[in-house]
Image (spheres, grey):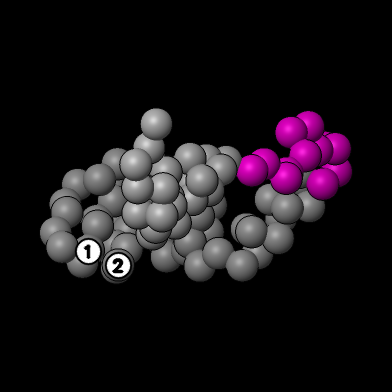
Amino acid sequence: MIRYPRLLLFFVLLFPPPSVTRAPDCVCVKDPHPPEEKVKADRRRVYDQATAVFAGKVVALDAYRVTFGLQKRWKGESSLNQVVLA
């Protein structure tokens, strides 16, 4: 039997258990299997908005700059390296 119900109620209201205040880990609203036409349209839109599209490996890294050695370039400057600033 609890001798101090008001004190207990006060602590429960002040410090609720984690399960009461915790947000859900993940809420997925995207279609897991979008139609191929939508995928192609999304890719085209992202490609058109991008400044550069390339495949490469990181060759240098510092706090604000990543330098990639280009392996393949689809869009952007035609140099051997691509620098991305953070």
Query: Measured from the top left, where is residue 19 in percent x and y?
Result: 48, 40
SS at circle 1:
strand
Q: Is 33 rendered above or below residue 52? A: above
Residue 56 included in the magenta stretch of the image: no
Is residue 79 rendered to the left or right of residue 31?
Answer: left
Q: Quadrant of residue 37?
A: top right
Query: Measured from the top left, where is residue 20 in percent x and y?
Result: 51, 46
- Three-letter residue code for mark 2: Ala
Q: Which residue is mark 1?
A: 65
Q: Nearer the viewer, residue 50 or 3?
A: 3
Is residue 67 rendered to the left or right of residue 42?
Answer: left
**Total numbered circles:** 2
Q: Which residue is mark 2?
A: 86
Please indicate, yes or no, whether residue 12 appears anywhere in the rendered image: no
* Foreground label between 1 and 2: 2
Query: Which class describes the residues within 10 Å of circle 1: few (<14), some (14-19), or many (20+)?
Result: few
Contact check, label 1 and label 2, Cβ < 8 Å: yes
**Which segment is the magenta one?**
27-38
- Three-letter residue code for mark 1: Arg
Q: Quadrant of residue 81?
A: bottom left
